[in-house]
Amino acid sequence: MKKIVFVFIVALTFFIQESKGQAMGQSYTTALGVKVWDGGGITIKHFVAANVAVEGIGYFWNRGVRIVGLYEFHYDIASAPGLKWYVGPGAHVGFYNNTYYNNNYPNGDGSGSYVGIDGVLGLDYKFDRAPINISLDWQPSFEFGSNRGFINNWGGLGIRYTF
C-alpha cells in the first residue's frame, strides 16, 4: 500500500511540474474550482480548442441539485491581457427536493427531476504567473415541465485552480 501511495505522489508531482509552465502564464487548458451563487457549486472547465471550452458545473443548494454542461466560445479583449469574454449554449438536469416546493406551492408542483437548455455569457480572467482563474457569468435557462419556464438567475463567480 505504501508503494502505491508513493508512486501516486511521484506521478502527481510530475504532472503538476509539467503543467506548471502553462498554468503560470495567461492561458490554461483545464481548471477546477468552485462557483459561488445563491448556493454553491463545483466547476471544471477544459479547453478543447484554442478558443473553445467545455464546462461542467454541479450546483448544490437547499432546493436540490442541478448539473449543467456548457459549450463556450472564448474571445480575447485586446486591451486586457488574460481577460476574455465568452458565450455559448448548454443544457442541464435538475433534481429538486419536495420540502421547498411543498412549502411554497400548495399543490406540491415543482419538485422532481427536470431538464432544460441553457445559455452563458461571461468574463474569464487568468492571472499571470499564478495558477488561478476567475470568471463571472450569467446563465439564463429554460426548463421544461410543470411549473417551469424561463429562469434568469443562474450563473455566478467561479474561482478555479488551473492546470
Image (spheres, grey):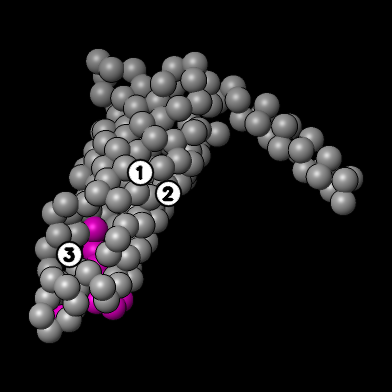
Residue 127 numbered tag: none
Snapshot quadrant of residue 124:
top left
Tell me how far mark 3 sits from mark 1, CA to CA.
20 Å
Say few, some or many: other residues with alpha carbon within 10 Å of mark 3 (under 14 / 14 to 19 / 20 or more): some
Tell me how far mark 2 sits from mark 3, CA to CA.
21 Å
Label 1 belongs to which residue? 35
Residue 76 higher or lower than 151, as above or below: above
Does 14 sit left or right of 123 as displayed? Answer: right
Three-letter amino acid code at the position of disc 2: Ile
Three-letter amino acid code at the position of disc 3: Phe
Does 71 sit left or right of 29 as displayed? Answer: left
Does 5 sit left or right of 131 as displayed? Answer: right
Label 3 belongs to which residue? 142
Say few, some or many: other residues with alpha carbon within 10 Å of mark 2 (under 14 / 14 to 19 / 20 or more): some
* Nearer-N-terminus badge (1/2): 1
* Nearer-N-terminus badge (3/1): 1
SS assignment at label 2: strand
**Residue under the point 68% across and 26% down:** 17
Tell me how far mark 1 sits from mark 2, CA to CA.
6 Å
Rendered location of residue 2, percent (x, y): 88, 46
Residue 135 higher or lower than 61, as above or below: above
Rendered location of residue 14, percent (x, y): 73, 32
The region drawn magenta spans 109-118
Q: Is residue 128 visible?
A: yes
**Residue under the point 41% across and 21% down:** 127
SS assignment at label 1: strand
**Residue under the point 27% across and 64% down:** 63
Closer to the camera, 20 or 63? 63
In terms of secondary structure, what is the magenta stretch mainly? strand
| Mark in front: 2 vs 3 | 2
Label 2 belongs to which residue? 42
- Placement of the C terminus among the 4 image quadrants: top right
